[in-house]
Image (tube, rainbow, N blue to C red):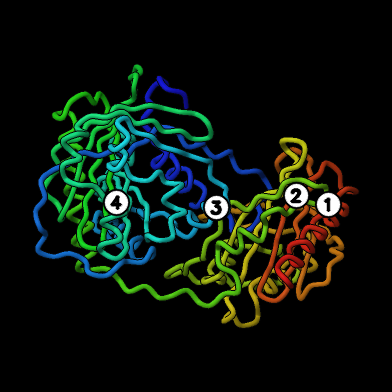
Amino acid sequence: MPAGTSRRWLGPLMAVLLTLAACSSGGSITPGSSRPPDSPQPSPALSTGTGTGPGTESPESPSRPFTDAELAAIINGVGQARNLPIPAAQDSTRLRSGASGGSFPPTSMAATPGECLAFVPQDPFTRWADKAVNFADGAMPPAGGQSGPTSTIMVVLRSAEKDAIATADFGYQDDLASRCGQFDLAYTESGRTSTYAVQLLAAPLVGEKRHAFMQVTKPKGPGDFGSVGLRVLNGTLSITLSLAVANLSSETDAKPALDAMAGLAKELLDRALTSTPSMAAPPPNSLTPDQLVALFKGVSGPDGEPVRLPQATVLGASPGFTPRATSRTPGSPCTISDESYAASLAGSVYGQGQIQGAGKLDYTDFTVISMPSTQAPPFPFDTRTEQLRGCTSVQEGLPGSGTRAWSSVSPLNLGIAADSSYALAYQLSDGTGEWHVRAGARRGTLSIEAASRTTSQPATQSKADALAAFFETVFARAGR
């Protein structure tokens, strides 16, 4: 987004988090039969800068580093206490795998004077790739309130051994603040640079060390939002908070945002000290999320098309959810529920990607799942395959309570040696007349499913053949 764009308030941290939240909430566990909308691209604006305030020693501070999962639990715990309807933290595993997979754009930052860059936290893409420091990102609207540009506080928690986190996030001498009361900041993403004026502010008394900032675009365009931020260090925990502010021009304008963030910082610190749950380690798996993403690097589709698996994660349990029964009476429609399928795969490493063809609508969606070694038969993939065997119509359960019907369902041949597999063609009542092809195969604990489409029924078998070739390539790279 070029400098001067109206209402330019989203920095890369906020924009990326909102993008990933949209991608990860309500998404299908298996390939859909229509292409998802394009995700918004992160804005090149930076919504984190800093200022400084006097330091006072906190009577209590965390003494051990927190894991990624524990940091996310701290954010979500505060969100629950504020009666937020959805989890407030993002999926750190997914963000890390995206960084290691190279799916995020190149970025750089520069300050004038250069030494003032010490007050600026890492951009999110760099932070997600930093394996030396644990982290969790999130967003926190007011308790019981609506999320919006000027009411959603962006949250970053980082943790490491005390000296390491102090050096990483607060590694500057106190006298540097006197030389960096005001400075310029340039943020470059994918070759596009935006510039900002940063002013350090007196920070509220929270934690052992802290600094605060206000930041506006330079030059400031009509309707541009500024941002106010607060960073706090307490023991092994670093907190960075930022909030967009309209008509930001003075420290007086910034004070309400700073007060709101100071209250949230205290809640996060209190949760870290008193109520952090112990997190069970995920079950053993032959592939980590990073390894699953790496498995697809350099892989091409059957016709040489690029294959993208941008991120992967570990599927969590669904508390209070019971998978639906899969039995059906003769003559009744078959059913398939991705919600139920996901509930049976807790602990699995999961990724969702795409093969893009020559045309905009020529694409294949796929999912890959590496089950934990502790998964016992019957495997969920095999149960799904049995559900689809012999079906002539299918009721597909959609997220929530909706359904849609697959009609004219017919089996296809999937020419691949596998422990379990299926392939079928069907139509949807969407008026397009298109034929959809869906196929899947499992070897050991690794399964792949993919969905594509074509304009004619005779072409569906060739689509299944192409998917089989893709599956073979992936299984071979995984040593299956």
Q: Is residue 204 above or below residue 226?
A: below
Q: Which mark is residue 169?
A: 4
Mark 2 and mark 3 in contact? Answer it, CB < 8 Å: no
Q: Amino acid at mark 2?
A: Ser
x, y percentage for residue 207?
15, 55
- 474 or 333, which is in the foreground? 474
**At x 31% / y 49%, what residue is drawn?**
155
Q: Is residue 195 above or below residue 443?
A: above
Q: Which mark is residue 463?
A: 1
- 291 or 247, which is in the foreground? 291
Q: Earlier in the sequence, mark 2 or mark 1?
A: 2
Q: Quadrant of residue 470?
A: bottom right
Label 3: how many Cα within 10 Å (few below 14, some 14–19, many 20+) = some
Q: Earlier in the sequence, mark 4 or mark 1?
A: 4
Q: Earlier in the sequence, mark 2 or mark 3?
A: 3
Q: Is residue 279 above or below residue 1?
A: below
Q: Which mark is residue 452?
A: 2
Give the distance between the C-alpha atoms of the residues marked 4 and 3, in whole angstroms.
34 Å
Q: Is residue 186 above or below residue 5?
A: below
**At x 46% / y 47%, what residue is drawn?**
125
Mark 2 and mark 4 in contact? Answer it, CB < 8 Å: no
Give the distance between the C-alpha atoms of the residues marked 2 and 3, in whole angstroms.
17 Å
Q: Earlier in the sequence, mark 3 or mark 1?
A: 3
Q: Secondary structure at mark 4?
A: helix
Which residue is labeled 3 in the image? 27
